[in-house]
Amino acid sequence: MHLRVLGSAAGGGSPQWNCGCANCVGIRSGHALLQARTQASAAVSADGRQWFLLAASPDVRAQIEAFPALHPRRLRDTPIGGVVLNNGDVDACLGLFILREDQPLVVYASEAVERGLREHNALTRTLERRPGQLTWNRLRAGEVVPLVGAAGPSGLTIEAVAVPGTVPLHLKGLAAASPDDNLAIVLRDAHGHSVIYAPTVAAHTPLLEERARTADALVFDGTFFRDDELTSLGLTTRSARDMAHWPLGGPEGSLRWLAQLPCRRKILTHINNTNPILRTGAPERDELTAAGVEVAYDGLEVEL
Ligand code: MLT
Ligand code: MN
Ligand code: ZN
């Protein structure tokens, strides 16, 4: 199985268009210890021919151009067979609308995520201009099913694991919270290798822990280092936990949990532009290194 991180930033990207934090300013000025990141997404393939996007980020167009394996091979074509939506947030789904040029794609989503996109949303009609443009395949927590794309079976299976999250901001007050709002995606190949894509995690669960214990690679929520990362800058009154992101640092942080997992690769993604781990040499970055945890960058590849 091949996995390529297409984008490793949280919603907004880094730099974020309206952000003047130290990291965003540093990236704009070409600081040697910082690099730009697009919004979180990954591509996965068992055979290197048919690829699946894990989340469709608002930056998907640039992400496809940056990875030749996703380029068309004929006049009208794509090696992308499908898109797996881990939640219904704008940064995980907006890319679907960017992929509107009448290309058959299979979309895997939970009921909550599919309804959030298809009900009360006129934009979705651009993805339904003709039958077969998108095929919606339902992800049900706890079910392991073959991952099948527009070009047929992928050679992978997919399992959705419900993880604590939240209703997307734009659905607050419109949709009730549901256990399948937010998923960790477990992919397994025919050789028994597995990878978990979990860019948004409010807390661990026994099932997530069980899956993580047998996974070869875990791509995990690295949004914030501290719970008060945004509130201390005066940017919002919502803490990391209020935003359903488990902060990395401190005695109750995700880093302690990650450190004791046996996975060969533990990689943080969906990293907010304010996060100090983006700086090579920062003490927070050294804590990650000591815990055996990597910081994703756009273009990072995992071969299993
Ligand atoms: C998040 O990761 O917390 C969300 O993407 C926030 C948002 O939808 O802007
Ligand atoms: Mn997000
Ligand atoms: Zn910033």
Image: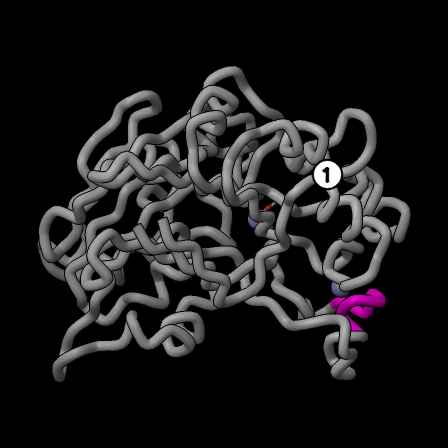
Residue 86 shows in the view: yes
Does mark 1 have its CB less than 8 Å from ligand 1? Answer: no
Would residue 23 be counted in the magenta stretch?
Answer: yes
- Name the residue carrying label 1: 248
Give the residue drawn at x 74%, y 31%.
253
Q: Residues within 10 Å of mark 1 (few under 14, many from 20)?
A: many
Q: Nearer the viewer, residue 227 or 290?
A: 290
Question: Residue 209 vs residue 287: left or right?
Answer: left
Would residue 173 be counted in the magenta stretch?
Answer: no
Q: Amino acid at mark 1?
A: Leu
Q: Which residues are magenta?
A: 19-25
Q: Position of residue 283 (x, y in %)?
A: 86, 52
Q: Position of residue 41 (x, y in %)?
A: 46, 56
Give the quadrant of residue 96: bottom left
Q: Nearer the viewer, residue 297 or 84?
A: 297
Give the residue drawn at x 73%, y 71%.
34
Task: Give the residue furthest to the top.
Answer: 206
Give the residue drawn at x 81%, y 49%.
284
Element at badge 1? loop
- Colour mapping used in the image: one colour
Residue 240 position (above or below residue 61): above
Q: Position of residue 212 (x, y in %)?
A: 48, 29
Residue 172 position (above or below residue 297): above
**How many numbered tags mark residues here?**
1
Question: Residue 33 vs residue 292: left or right?
Answer: right
Q: Nearer the viewer, residue 3 or 175?
A: 3
Q: Position of residue 116 (x, y in %)?
A: 39, 40
Residue 115 shows in the view: no
Give the residue drawn at x 56%, y 58%.
8
